[in-house]
Amino acid sequence: MQSFLAPKCLLVIAKSARMLVQMCLDSGCEVVAIDCFTDSDTQQMTKQTYQVASLAWDDIRAAVEAAWRDYGLTHLLYGSGLERYPETLLNLEKHWQVIGNSAGTFQRIQDKHDFFARLDSLSIPHPEVVFTQPDDDLDWLLKPWRGEGGMGIRRCGSSADAAGGYWQRYIEGRSLSVLFVASRDRVELIGFNEQWTVKSDCEQSFVFAGIASHAEVSVSIQTEIADWIGRLVDTYELRGLNCMDFMLHDGQCYVLEVNARISASAQLYGKSLLLPHLQACENRLVDSVELLSEPSAYQIVYSQKNVTIPERLEWPIWAVDRPNPGAIVGKGEPICSIMATGKNSGQVRETLHRQQCILANLLEKGL
């Protein structure tokens, strides 16, 4: 990788680019973005935002070529959404300087057969996994081969579902993640986070709904997790900001997956995380990361009914990922996201609840 710290302007590609765009601006970089929503706040922060139907290569190719032709960009930063389209990252690597894990690393860590076999070889615990229909009546989850944000996960169904994924034993417990930054010679844990999913009246849902920083985790577990991450970083040659999801049950941790890209939790630790990501991808992580000391949370607000976004809605400052005026949001789809900071986790939860009530009133009244 060529030597750089902060390119003047970056191309950002993600299913929803707002978080990465904000990180770039906080670090002094201008941004051209490609995403699937072109939310109003994303558009306001970028030089140009291209909306695409998906992150499949055929869908984004024209936008990528336009960004190169019109702005002369050479470096790109990617986020969530490429899990289902590994060919996209392979194509991008041919002509762009990609800031993050290589396409090879990104694909290898999503190979479920290989990933869980590697966990076993490294003596890292994980929920039991099978790749053929289980024959017992215990709790199993059917998970897609390539997924993000918990989408597509469901309770074990019929054998007709088998082509869509693999089975993993369901574990009750705390759903946690750890954000970390890795270079060739150094790994630094940024923070532990508590995650939660969408609540449903009819059945349990596993779709990601929110995440809170500074989760309380014992020192012994922190030490154990740090050791596991060190092994995984060496095995996969992970670089930059990454995130590992795990369950905590009766004092035992079980690894679920590693997200080999910048995750949603990165926005909860202050405005300086892009620099260590750039440094680590260049294998020269030299600065200690300056972190926001107070607990913060990010939550997606899903619509309880079909909603049309009012033309003159004055969004509160804590509401992000704001849809454009006149947009129609269907029941169960995300309206926007909300963010809160407080002195402790209880205060953060109370603030999130209050914000949801305020937002519901604003949308109802159309103010």
Image (tube, grey):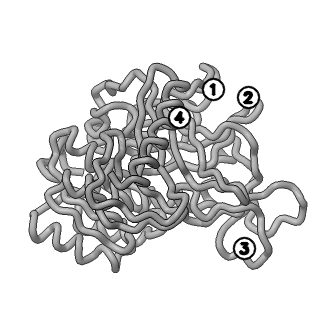
Q: Which comes sooner in the sequence, label 3 or label 1? A: 3
**Residue occupying the point 44% across, 47% down:** 361
Q: Identify which amino acid the numbered label 1 is placed on.
A: Ile
Q: Identify which amino acid the numbered label 2 is placed on.
A: Gly
**Residue occupying the point 10% across, 63% down:** 71
Residue extending furthest toward the right? 136
In the image, which disc is placed on residue 221?
1
Whole-number angstrom distance, CA of label 3 to CA of label 2: 32 Å
**Residue occupying the point 30% across, 73% down:** 60
Q: Which comes sooner in the sequence, label 4 or label 3? A: 3
Q: Identify which amino acid the numbered label 3 is placed on.
A: Ala
Q: Which residue is mark 2?
A: 251
Whole-number angstrom distance, CA of label 3 to CA of label 1: 35 Å
Q: Which residue is mark 4?
A: 193
Rendered view: 120 above or below 229 = below
Q: Position of residue 63 (x, y in %)?
A: 23, 72
Q: Secondary structure at mark 3?
A: helix
Q: Which residue is mark 3?
A: 162
Query: Around disc 4, counting alpha carbons within 10 Å, would you say few (fewer than 14), some (14 to 19), or many (20 or more)?
Result: many
Q: Nearer the viewer, residue 136 or 308?
A: 308
Q: Secondary structure at mark 2?
A: loop
Whole-number angstrom distance, CA of label 4 to CA of label 3: 32 Å
